Amino acid sequence: MSAFDNSAIEVTPQRAAELLAGGASMIDVREGYERDAGYIAGTRHIELERLASSAEEIDRSAPVVFHCRLGVRSAMAASAFRSAGFDAYTLTGGIQAWVDAGLPIEPDGGYVAEH
């Protein structure tokens, strides 16, 4: 089993929305231009390459859900953070699955950028 098919860390868009509404952190690990195109309200942006150096800024007392475009980068992040003791998850299918589920992104007219 690889980090990319670990059901223990995967959450659906609906579950991710519930976690976010309940106080979980949601971190967008995409590149800046991807974030600029469209993002989930209430999320924090930390590019994957800067994530390790920003780990101390992430609240360990609440769940953290990572997301990217399709879920590969966020699965790597969630797996690493879970190994470091965080209650970490990945948004299965990424922001694309979020949009496909009919959940909103910002700004108005926002879209999922190619990576």
Image (cartoon, rainbow, N blue to C red):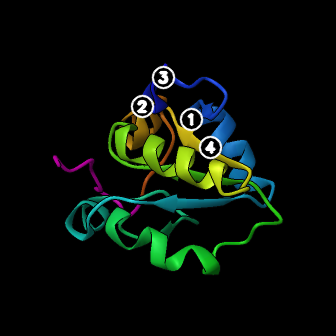
Mark 2 to mark 1: distance in Å? 8 Å
Label 3 or label 1, whichever comes before in sequence order: 3
SS for callout 2? loop
Q: Report which residue position mark 2 lands on.
A: 93
* CB contact under 8 Å: marks 2 and 1: yes
Mark 4 Cα shell of 10 Å, populated few (<14), some (14-19), many (≥20): many
- Is 34 left, or right, of 15 in this rendering? left
Label 3 or label 2, whichever comes before in sequence order: 3
Nearer the camera: disc 2 or disc 1:
2
Q: In this picture, which residue range is highlighted in magenta?
A: 106-115
Q: Report which residue position mark 3 lands on.
A: 5
Q: Report which residue position mark 4 lands on.
A: 89
Q: Position of residue 40 (x, y in %)?
A: 48, 56
Q: Report which residue position mark 1 lands on.
A: 13
SS for callout 3? helix
The residue type indicated by label 3 comes to Asp
The residue type indicated by label 2 comes to Gly
